Amino acid sequence: MAQLAGLILVFVLVFGGLFLTGGSGAMHALPFEMALIGGAAVGTVLIGNSLSVAREALGGFAKAFGGAKWRRDDYQDLLVLLGTLMRKARQGGFVAIEADIETPEESAAFEAVPRILDDEGASGMICDAFRLMALDLSDPARAEQRMDQSIAAYLDQRMKAVGALNTLADALPALGIVAAVLGIIRTMGSIDQSPAVLGTMIGSALLGTFLGVFLAYGLVGPVAARFGQIVDEDARFLDVIRSTLGAYSEGLAPGVALEMGRAAIPPALQPDTATLEQALSASRFIAKSRTAA
């Protein structure tokens, strides 16, 4: 919400000033210049990146204004899910959670947390970690190494998209100059016109430089910075999974492993101990009810 308010403020001030000082000529040329620079900007992103990275980069605009994906309730749901799976594995061995990790879409534990189930990165990381622990009990560190690799792959893909936006921000002033030069060329072709006409044409040409600088430092640059922050914030969710299951794979009790994971959650999103314990108790009660039924 703060980012959206900032965007509105910037646009109102800048384009309000342009309207008041630039007159009708500048406003008449604005759509053409915007389409020229914007189209060239999208083209540079496509030229310099793979299709997946380009799509991720352009989607970064929506993510920058939408905020981080994971909320406080999601972190609590994650700890409850991990606690449920660790407790079942502790009591009945890894065979007790085989159905949960092989077909999570049919697991009652995963169905209780649909946002985590729908996220392939988070659900896949959980299932892979438990699967590796079950396959190789002699080397518990292997599961943690695999989780480290998953987090690194997540960050690599998304930081490439952040880098693409930063490159675009660097390129926009130059694209604005290109648009301005095109306007000057058009003006020189009408050199026999009156000074009033030439003044309007030159002002429209300089509008390209204005837009290039504004879009670079007033929009794309800040969006890239915010997108990078969101990537880091969302990666924290995966880091909590790694911290919790890494502790469990080393032989710590589920309760201790959960506390290790809770400590890895940012303070602003961290569920308190009492609330988490209530959620875990409710999960255990529901599981016993299903078993009895």
Image (cartoon, rainbow, N blue to C red):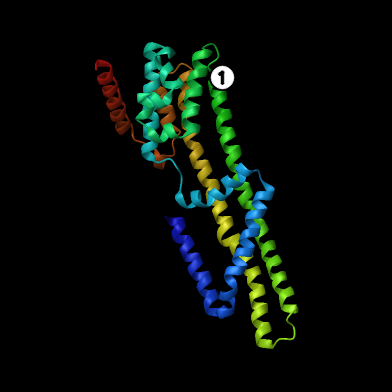
Against 225, is 30 above or below?
Answer: below
Q: Dot 1, crowdedness within 10 Å: few (<14), some or many (≥20)?
A: some
Residue 213 showing in the rendered view: no
Rendered image quadrant of residue 78: top left
Residue 267 showing in the rendered view: yes
Residue at 47% x, 22% y: name it.
Answer: 247
- Looking at the picture, which amino acid does disc 1 mark? Arg
Q: Which quadrant is home to the N terminus?
A: bottom left
Give x and y (percent) for residue 259: 40, 27
Give x and y (percent) for residue 286: 27, 24
Rendered image quadrant of residue 85: top left
Against 113, is 181 above or below?
Answer: below
Indicate the secondary structure of the residue bearing disc 1.
helix
Residue at 56% x, 19% y: name it.
Answer: 142
Give x and y (percent) for residue 261: 43, 29
Give x and y (percent) for residue 165: 61, 51
Left-right relation of 292 to 115: left
Q: Which quadrant is home to the C terminus?
A: top left
Picture mark count: 1
Left-right relation of 54 to 118: right
Q: Which residue does the numbered mark 1 point to in the structure image?
A: 142
Left-right relation of 215 to 252: right
Residue at 66% x, 46% y: name it.
Answer: 49
Residue at 71% x, 78% y: name it.
Answer: 187
Rendered image quadrant of residue 192: bottom right
